[in-house]
């Protein structure tokens, strides 16, 4: 995995400075501060994220039909948890990465929907009384509050399972070997050596007095792996060359690290109404985060540098990667 | 799905009667009563089941390493739940089905281990306080008793995820398309339209006053689908022709139905010490089972007929399917 070392002079700067006519060049520090993206990018990105979310929601709606029998209840809980209007950042990363290689959109949307199913299942189980014990998620009662604990456990299990059914279906890509690789990378990112391992660390964090390195590792596993694998799956759909694959992977890793710091800042600073979930929980639980270890100012600075590094990793893709660059900026500027 | 209609004169009878010299033929009813298998089959089968269990345990041991970090805890819980000495009937069905087509054993053992991971995860989650609330499983504390609820939830999630990582790995079969098909059939059998759907029905069964058809459907989903898919995956590994695939599927479906009735009989009649788990739970919970609806005598008779039908479905494979035939008999004769 790419290290998170804060590079004082990111590679993209050299690229950018070379590409911009001399009279338009600003001092490097200023370019770094606004990550070098045009000011209108943010609203273009927000619209693009919204459009992808709408497409992914339609895809999830299709993929999660309601059966007739009494087992309908678990399907209702799956739909309640998966169709609840999240930002769909992971599906966006899948399709924006796949777009670099002109992958037909129906494939990348299905693969994005599968990744989102994994994300949603992890939230459903994370919210359970035995885990984080949360009542509120995206402004609505959590799954076990809206249904019951047993149904929430089963709905999470079924969403996790369904993700692999979707990926292995020929409608996700005509080449069976590529579908198989998609399954492999997602299973590895989501399992005990990835996201679930991070959730385990998170459970232990309150009592374990983690140092900075351990905290970063927790975050890289819990959040980073799923963001990084989203980009990797887009690249797999596009049958990217190893070098391009590696760069997209680096982008995803930096993005994931920035995302988690921004999340911790939001937990500290945003209101419950903004986030649609309980805030201040990390502090109350005595959990070490990058923010609690270094303070919000340093955290903001590091997050920004990580975004710079994410952006720099996209050099080879030129203008085509503009929406991925904007996504990196968005991760640290979002208010929810 | 093959129907469970009780055929008064199973096909295998005609096959068997034709194959046995006239002076050795017993009256059809007697042949049916001991399912037509030689009396020494049972001990041969038990030994064969034991050998496969040992091989699968070694494979699971390999596939579930213990990492160094604090997330080791979830890996320990996975190993606790997956390496606890079950009968490994599902892996046996995978490898015995694959043996019909001379599939190299390392493939069928890995695939069997993946199926067993799904089975074990379902037990871990089923035992949780919010579900069946069981303290005892295979004679030991259940996972959430030995660890804690949060760890048990995560260990179940990770076992489920790992199953797909194993299937999609090239070590499970050199052909990516076959690996992809293995993922597809297992995900469909284990998800909301299969095993999880059955678990949902099971949760509702206590209050829902299910009739016989609904009870059979619950059992077919909760237990039958995973037994049937085990045979199907063996056939997939062997790249079986559609007709052979269909027959193995029929075998699995009949076997699954027989297995569940036998399970309900054990729940009613066996001791807690025999089973290594709490008994009499169905009755206490007021759950409809085939046994509660028709009484143990009729249940035993139907289970036996289902075994006959399972055995009959194997006609085309001749002597090579002897261990699968013995497995069918075992499902209704077992004491635990």
Image: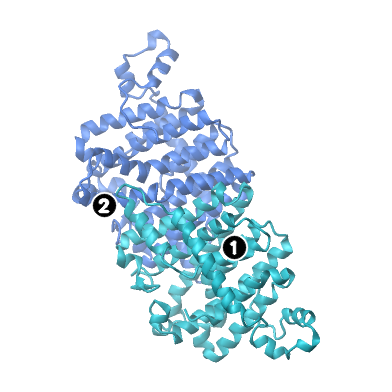
Chain colours: A cyan, B blue
Q: Quadrant of residue A101?
A: bottom right
Residue B204's disc is 2
Q: Dot 2: few (<14), some (14–19), or many (≥20) neighbours within 10 Å?
A: some
- The answer to whether B4 is drawn above or below residue B15 in the figure is below
Using the rendered image of the protein, determine whether residue A247 is visible from the camera's viewpoint: yes
- The answer to whether B139 is drawn above or below residue A242 in the figure is above
User: Which chain is indicated by disc 2?
Assistant: B
User: Which chain is indicated by disc 1?
Assistant: A
Residue at 37% from the left image edge and 55% from the top image edge: A75
Q: Nearer the viewer, mark 2 or mark 1?
A: 1
Q: Is A261 situated left or right of B214 in this image? A: right
Q: Quadrant of residue B305?
A: top left
Give the number of marks: 2
Q: Dot 1: few (<14), some (14–19), or many (≥20) neighbours within 10 Å?
A: many
User: How far separated are the C-alphas under marks 2 and 1?
Assistant: 39 Å
Quarter in which the N terminus of chain A is drawn = bottom right
Q: Is A133 situated left or right of A263 in this image? A: left
Mark 2–mark 1 CB contact (< 8 Å): no
Give the structural element (helix, strand or loop) at label 1.
helix
Q: Percent from the top left, x then y, of residue B31?
A: 34, 19
Residue B22's disc is none
Q: Percent from the top left, x then y, of residue B207?
A: 21, 52
Front in this rendered view, residue B319 or A301? A301
Q: Is B153 situated left or right of A180 in this image? A: left
Residue at 22% from the left image edge and 31% from the top image edge: B298
Residue A95's disc is 1
Q: Percent from the top left, x then y, of residue A306?
A: 62, 80
Residue at 37% from the left image edge and 74% from the top image edge: A139
Give the structural element (helix, strand or loop) at label 2.
helix
Q: Percent from the top left, x then y, of residue A45?
A: 58, 74
């Amino acid at each position: 995995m790419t290290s998170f070392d804060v590079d004082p002079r990111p590679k993209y700067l050299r690229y950018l400075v070379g590409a911009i006519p001399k009279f338009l060049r600003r001092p490097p520090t200023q370019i770094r501060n606004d990550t070098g993206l045009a000011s209108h990018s943010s609203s273009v990105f927000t619209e693009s994220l919204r459009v992808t979310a709408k497409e992914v929601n339609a895809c999830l709606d299709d993929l999660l039909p309601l059966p007739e029998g009494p087992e309908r209840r678990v399907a209702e809980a799956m739909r309640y948890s998966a169709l609840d209007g999240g930002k769909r950042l992971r599906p966006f990363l899948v399709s924006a990465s796949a777009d670099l290689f002109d992958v037909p959109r129906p494939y990348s949307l299905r693969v994005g929907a599968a990744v989102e199913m994994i994300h949603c299942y992890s939230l459903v189980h994370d919210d359970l009384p035995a885990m984080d014990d949360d009542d509120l998620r995206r402004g609505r009662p959590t799954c076990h509050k809206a249904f019951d604990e047993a149904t929430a456990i089963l709905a999470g299990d079924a969403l996790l399972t369904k993700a692999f059914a979707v990926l292995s279906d020929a409608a996700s890509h005509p080449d069976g070997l590529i579908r198989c690789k998609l399954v492999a990378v997602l299973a590895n990112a989501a399992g005990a050596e990835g996201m679930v391992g991070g959730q385990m660390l998170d459970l232990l964090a309150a009592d374990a007095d983690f140092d900075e390195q351990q905290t970063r590792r927790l975050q890289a596993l819990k959040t980073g792996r799923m963001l990084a694998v989203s980009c990797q799956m887009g690249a797999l759909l596009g049958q990217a060359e190893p070098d391009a694959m590696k760069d997209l992977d680096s982008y995803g890793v930096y993005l994931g690290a920035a995302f988690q710091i921004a999340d911790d800042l939001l937990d500290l600073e945003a209101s419950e109404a903004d986030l649609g979930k309980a805030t201040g929980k990390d502090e109350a639980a005595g959990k070490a985060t990058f923010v609690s270890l270094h303070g919000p100012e340093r955290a903001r600075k590091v997050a920004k540098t990580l975004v710079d590094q994410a952006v720099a990793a996209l050099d080879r893709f030129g203008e085509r990667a503009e929406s991925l660059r904007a996504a990196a900026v968005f991760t640290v500027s979002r208010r929810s």
